[in-house]
Image: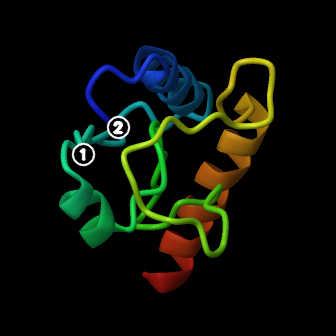
Amino acid sequence: MTPDCPYTALAEALITVTLNELGLSHTPVLTTVIATTAEATRRQFTGSPSIVINGVDPWAHPGGEPGLTCRIHPSPAGLPTPHSLAQALIAAVQDDHRAS
């Protein structure tokens, strides 16, 4: 996230609720503030809030330019839908189980 991103609290709430609904409330969630253009470039950060699961941003736009921008998803809340977040989390859990 970037400092002062208006979607940060909503994104954090969405993640918490979705993890709880999936029975994954024990899953650690790390919030990282991207404060400089250099850091955005280094991390390939294409907008705030970005939700990264196991190092992958499931909603990344190919060829998106890194930068300190606001990222609005095409949904009424401007975030990934609860369903798409749940699907991404379930896929990550399945991938983790296959790798074990």
In the image: residue 89, left or right of residue 29:
right
Q: Could you say which disc has been placed on residue 34 in the image?
A: 1
Q: Could you say which disc has been placed on residue 15 in the image?
A: none
The tag earlier along the polypeptide, 1 or 2, is 2
In the image: residue 12, left or right of residue 64:
left
Label 1: element kind: loop
- Image height of 15 relative to 56, above or below: above
Judge the density around disc 1: few (<14), some (14-19), many (≥20) Cα neighbours within 10 Å: some
Judge the density around disc 2: few (<14), some (14-19), many (≥20) Cα neighbours within 10 Å: many
Camera-side residue of 21 and 69: 69
**Percent x, y for residue 72?**
64, 34
Question: Residue under circle 2?
Answer: 1
- Image height of 4 relative to 26, above or below: above
In the image: residue 88, left or right of residue 97:
right
**Percent x, y for residue 62?**
66, 73
Q: Give the spatial CA distance, label 1 vs label 2.
A: 6 Å
